[in-house]
């Protein structure tokens, strides 16, 4: 959110043309057209992106005489911010995450020019305040100001009880860096979701691209491939916004597209090579249950409709249960049928297990037969759970971004190995083929 100093700009009268809303701090359409022509000319030039490293941090932060705090990277934290659980340590942690993620993002998708402007703000220093009433009408819980001397200030409403996430800091500092492509009223307009704002508002777009990439990826997986550049092409509002060289825009899109290509290949491989192993038994563990004799007993008990798949009909049975054979998924969502399959399997198999339990004794089945089937059933569910987790794509990206990539993979391996699954063909293939590729995908968001 932006506020404060920009309110002065709202006093400038702007003539209205046509029916499009005209924001008070934005140039009139005629000026926008002229500006667009200039922007096109600028694009034709080779833009050298400046390399401005962030300032070297002090070894330690320090308390200031007024009860505030000066962080290692030079942020002045006002005394009123140390409420709730906010401590110098928590602030330093947020800033460390902020700088690491911004730097990582710059290496892969954030244009060098924008990152240099962001680093320039760090050189200028910024004051962090926590005053009530300054961010009125906002939805993000923080706002940026520039005082008369051009100094940067970010305010976090104290009602929140904390100083926001590193993503929120990034957002506010992008305002300070001048990354806006929307005028203030448009940027601050209420009633829009974060996802919608990321479509055409460059500050929200970069916040998403660097700190919530799952938002961009979800839109692209759903077929909106242009979201990776739409906000960057939007020159319509602010006269002094950051201009991007076309190669920078392509680089950002390429990063997301490459990820989706590799993600799609991983899921397709999981569906075609890993998925059949879920039902494997014999050499691995657990051993196949006596499915033939179980079926004979079920038919004899008048329960032919509950018949179980045999070793030779397993794959066809599973495909039928899952409707997996109905299609391999769209180009954007190849995991969709696999995910549907895995989530349906549990209820199908649970229902059959309950049916078998009613046939023990008088129903013609022995406890040993049913127990053998249950072991097999549990092994299928174990593999099914691993595959369902593998297709939980947003969670994979979020966990990678929060630094939990290795624990995520460890949890999947532990899950696969549980209840004797360590020696199964499924887990062996999962650990040998899938895990390294998954680790490579997750590393891109760290
Ligand atoms: Zn904002």
Image (cartoon, rainbow, N blue to C red):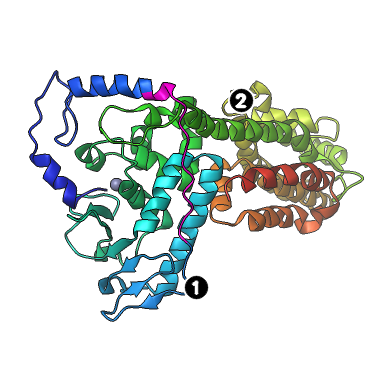
Q: Which residue is mark 2?
A: 329
Instruction: Please say if 274 is above or below 356.
Output: above
Which element is circle 2 on? loop
Instruction: Name the residue at the bottom extreme.
Output: 65
Residue 204: % across, % down: 36, 42
Name the residue at 92% across, 45% down. Answer: 283
- What secondary structure is the magenta-colored segment mainly? loop
Horizontally, residue 106 falls left or right of residue 344, namely: left
Number of labelled discs?
Answer: 2
Residue 378: % across, % down: 74, 50
Is ligand 1 closer than 8 angstroms to the Cβ of mark 1?
no
Crowdedness near tag 1: few (<14), some (14–19) or many (≥20) residues, C-alpha within 10 Å = few
Please tell me the numbered disc located at residue 59. 1
Viewer-closest of 274 and 133: 133
Name the residue at 51% across, 31% down. Answer: 253
Is ligand 1 closer than 8 angstroms to the Cβ of mark 2?
no
Viewer-closest of 355 and 287: 287
Q: Which residues are magenta?
A: 42-55
């Amino acid at each position: 959110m932006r506020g404060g100093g920009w309110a002065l700009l709202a006093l400038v009268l702007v003539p209205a043309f046509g029916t499009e809303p005209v924001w008070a701090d934005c140039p009139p359409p005629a000026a926008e057209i002229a500006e667009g022509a200039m922007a096109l000319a600028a694009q034709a030039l080779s833009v050298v992106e400046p390399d401005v490293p962030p300032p070297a941090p002090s070894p330690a932060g320090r308390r200031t005489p007024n009860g505030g705090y000066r962080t290692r990277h030079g942020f002045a934290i006002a005394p009123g911010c140390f409420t709730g659980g906010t401590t110098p340590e928590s602030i330093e942690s947020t800033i460390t995450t902020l700088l690491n993620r911004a730097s990582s993002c710059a290496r892969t998708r954030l244009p060098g020019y924008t990152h240099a402007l962001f680093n320039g703000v760090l050189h200028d220093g910024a004051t962090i305040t926590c005053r009530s009433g300054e961010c009125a009408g906002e939805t993000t819980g923080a706002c940026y100001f520039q005082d008369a001397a051009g100094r940067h200030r970010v305010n976090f409403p104290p009602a929140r009880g904390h100083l926001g996430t590193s993503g929120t800091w990034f957002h506010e500092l992008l305002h300070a860096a001048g990354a806006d492509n929307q005028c203030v009223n448009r940027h601050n307009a209420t009633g829009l979701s974060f996802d919608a704002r990321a479509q055409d508002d460059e500050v929200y777009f970069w916040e998403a691209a660097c700190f919530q990439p799952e938002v961009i990826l979800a839109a692209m997986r759903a077929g909106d491939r242009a979201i990776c550049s739409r906000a960057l092409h939007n020159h319509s509002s602010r006269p002094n916004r950051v201009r991007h060289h076309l190669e920078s825009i392509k680089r950002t899109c390429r990063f997301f597209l490459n990820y989706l290509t590799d993600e799609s290949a991983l899921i397709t491989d999981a569906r075609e090579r890993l998925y059949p192993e879920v039902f494997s038994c014999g050499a691995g563990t657990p051993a196949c249950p006596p499915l033939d004799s179980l079926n004979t007993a079920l038919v004899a008990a008048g329960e032919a409709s509950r018949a179980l798949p045999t070793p030779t009909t397993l794959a066809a049975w599973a495909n039928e249960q899952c409707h997996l054979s109905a299609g391999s998924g769209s180009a954007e969502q190849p995991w969709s049928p696999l995910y549907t399959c895995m989530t349906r399997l549990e209820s199908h198999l649970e229902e059959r297990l309950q049916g078998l339990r009613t046939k023990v004794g008088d129903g013609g089945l022995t406890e040993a037969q049913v127990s053998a089937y249950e072991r097999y059933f549990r092994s299928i569910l174990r593999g099914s759970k691993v595959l369902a987790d593998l297709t939980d794509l947003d969670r994979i990206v979020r966990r990678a971004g929060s630094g939990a990539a290795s624990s995520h993979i460890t949890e999947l391996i532990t899950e696969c190995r549980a209840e004797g699954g360590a020696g199964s063909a499924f887990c062996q293939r999962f650990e040998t083929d899938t895990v390294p590729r998954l680790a490579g995908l997750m590393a891109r968001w760290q």
